[in-house]
Image (cartoon, coloured by chain):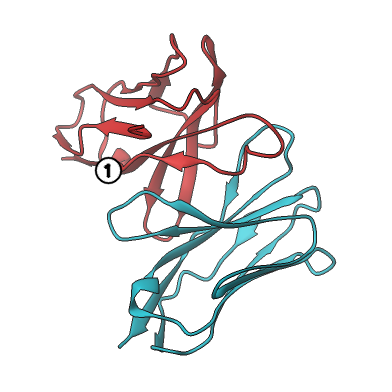
């Protein structure tokens, strides 16, 4: 199993550009999520999904869109990049049972810089 | 005020020392308490998990939950340089699968 994969690993954008961060998992997890991690602020939830066709907003959704057409894929779109979106982005997945939801599997992250 | 508070450190200790890492929280609905470890430039990985109150031991690691004080701890015995990482606490009420995260404590074990 590859686990959770993310592409690209690094990206530099100019203000106003758009892009899509890719995330895929091969563990048949129902729950998938996107976090951003900034120094001193821990992991903040951007968007999440509990299954194909179902998405919802997290703590910091503004400026980002998601969709989930398959169980495996959960892309994150930046609509018009801003310097405040400079961060490390992690995709994570898990099952949705009470005995397993607490174990989230993370991808390697995407380091995004917006100039 | 954040739901979960965690001192970001860094915490620097000599090899072999006992390390204590802590988080406090405000939401009494939390039932699941986790510690994740994150090495530099990697994603977090689950280290230990505790349901409700009590202690759990796994090798050199012990997790404690005190729900009456809304306080959780992770103890590392005989610390090794390979334990140098950022340790994040996370909590869940279990109702919507979302985890609430602390800011993470950076731990440095000096050889």
Q: Which residue appears at 39% of the width and 88% of the height?
A: B15
Residue B1 appears in view = no
Question: Does residue A9 sit above or below B42 in this rendering?
Answer: above
Which quarter of the image is occupied by the C terminus of chain A?
top left
Measured from the top left, where is residue A82 in percent x and y?
27, 34
Q: Chain of mark 1?
A: A
Per the image, the residue denoted by label 1 is: A86
In the rendered structure, the answer to whether residue A11 lies left or right of residue B23 reads left
Give the colour of chain A: red
Give the colour of chain B: cyan
Measured from the top left, where is residue A4 in percent x and y?
37, 33
Q: Which residue appears at 63% of the width and 57% of the height?
A: B4
Please tell me in which quadrant of the rendered image residue B97 appears. Answer: top right
Q: Secondary structure at mark 1?
A: loop
Q: Which residue appears at 20% of the width and 32% of the height?
A: A8
Question: Does residue A79 sit above or below A83 in this rendering?
Answer: above
């Amino acid at each position: 199993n590859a686990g959770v994969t993310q592409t690209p690993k690094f990206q530099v954008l100019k203000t106003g550009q758009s892009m899509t961060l890719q995330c895929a998992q091969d563990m048949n997890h129902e729950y998938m999520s996107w976090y951003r991690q900034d120094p001193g602020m821990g992991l903040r939830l951007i968007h999440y999904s509990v299954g194909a066709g179902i998405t919802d907003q997290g703590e910091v959704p503004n400026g980002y869109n998601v969709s989930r057409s398959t169980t495996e894929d959960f892309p994150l779109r930046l609509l018009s990049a801003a310097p405040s979106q400079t961060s490390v982005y992690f995709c994570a997945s898990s099952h949705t049972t009470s005995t397993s939801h607490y174990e989230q599997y993370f991808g390697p992250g995407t380091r995004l810089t917006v100039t | 005020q954040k739901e979960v508070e965690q001192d970001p450190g860094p915490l620097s200790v000599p090899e072999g020392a006992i390390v204590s890492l802590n988080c406090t929280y405000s939401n009494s609905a939390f039932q699941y308490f986790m510690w994740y470890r994150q090495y530099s430039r990697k994603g977090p990985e689950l280290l230990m998990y505790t349901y409700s109150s009590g202690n759990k031991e796994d090798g050199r690691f012990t997790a404690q939950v005190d729900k009456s004080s809304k306080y959780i701890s992770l103890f590392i015995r005989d610390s090794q340089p390979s334990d140098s990482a950022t340790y994040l606490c996370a909590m869940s009420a279990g109702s919507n699968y979302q985890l609430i995260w602390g800011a993470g404590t950076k731990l440095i074990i000096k050889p």
